[in-house]
Image (cartoon, helix red, strand yellow):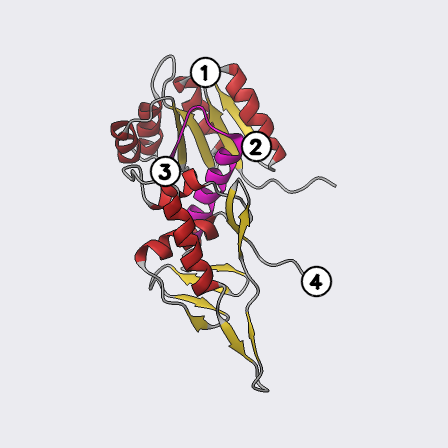
Amino acid sequence: MSKPIEAKIVVVDDEPSIRELLVASLHFAGFEVATAASGSEAIEVIEKTQPDLVVLDVMLPDIDGFTVTRRIRQEGIDSPVLFLTARDDTQDKVMGLTVGGDDYVTKPFSLEEVVARIRAILRRTREQVEDDPIIRVADLEINEDSHDVTRAGQPVDLSPTEYKLLRYLMDNEGRVLSKAQILDHVWQYDWGGDAAIVESYISYLRKKVDGVEVTEADGSKHKVAPLIQTKRGIGYMIREPKEA
């Protein structure tokens, strides 16, 4: 029995090898994929398929990815755009966000990172459409409107950075995030420190989120099941505990 299609994706890149790798990886992850090799072809394919997300190379042989994004936005197509670029340039990133892009991946990239970012974008945009401010993983909840965090119904007091880190982990529930990815998203591109800051903040989150104590009706107490996990040598993830 085939699994249901998670979303429709359009992949735009003029390099056949990159297109093929992305298509294979996205198909394996459960996405339906269409492709284009140029900017003009991309506009035609996007108009025809009305995808849930576009993976768009910035440097294309005819018109660049920024121009493609401007044109589809002018036509009222609001599909999220994940840019692929060989240039790790802040000016390019600002330009991409200005024309209506949603995120960036710099070449060379890992296929796992692309899939994780796609899912994070889709989750954000679908939540906006559904207008549900609550994000949940097991008994952990974030209210995006009020920025309140609760675990097993109890309030959890987080700093702005702790909140941002928790939000990023929950956006990517079940997926391992490297320290570099976390630094990039939580501390942004201008962070010049080392990855030790990530370890420190993960430790803070564990104490606050996984350290909550629940009191039962009979007065007995127990700690909640841990949600934040370390994949040694790879990174961190958050996911619902497996049933015993």
Name the element at disc 1.
loop
| Residue 128 in sight here | no
Q: How far apart are marks 4 and 2 (CA)?
A: 32 Å
* Of the image marks 1 and 2, the number of the one nearer the N terminus: 1
* Of the image marks 4 and 1, the number of the one nearer the N terminus: 1
Query: Residue 240 vs residue 122: left or right?
Result: right
Q: Mark 1 points at which residue?
A: 14
Q: Indicate yes or no whether the magenta region holds residue 203.
A: no
* Of the image marks 4 and 2, the number of the one nearer the N terminus: 2
Decide which of 183, 4 is in the foreground and name it. 183
Q: Distance between the residues labelled 1 and 2?
A: 17 Å
Q: Nearer the viewer, mark 4 or mark 2?
A: 4
Q: What stretch is highlighted in magenta?
A: 102-127
Q: Position of residue 173 (x, y in %)?
A: 52, 50
48 w.r.t. 177: above or below = above
Query: Residue 206 vs residue 239: left or right?
Result: left
Name the element at disc 2.
helix
Q: How far apart are marks 4 and 1 (CA)?
A: 48 Å
Decide which of 83, 228 is in the foreground and name it. 228
Q: Name the residue under label 3.
A: 102
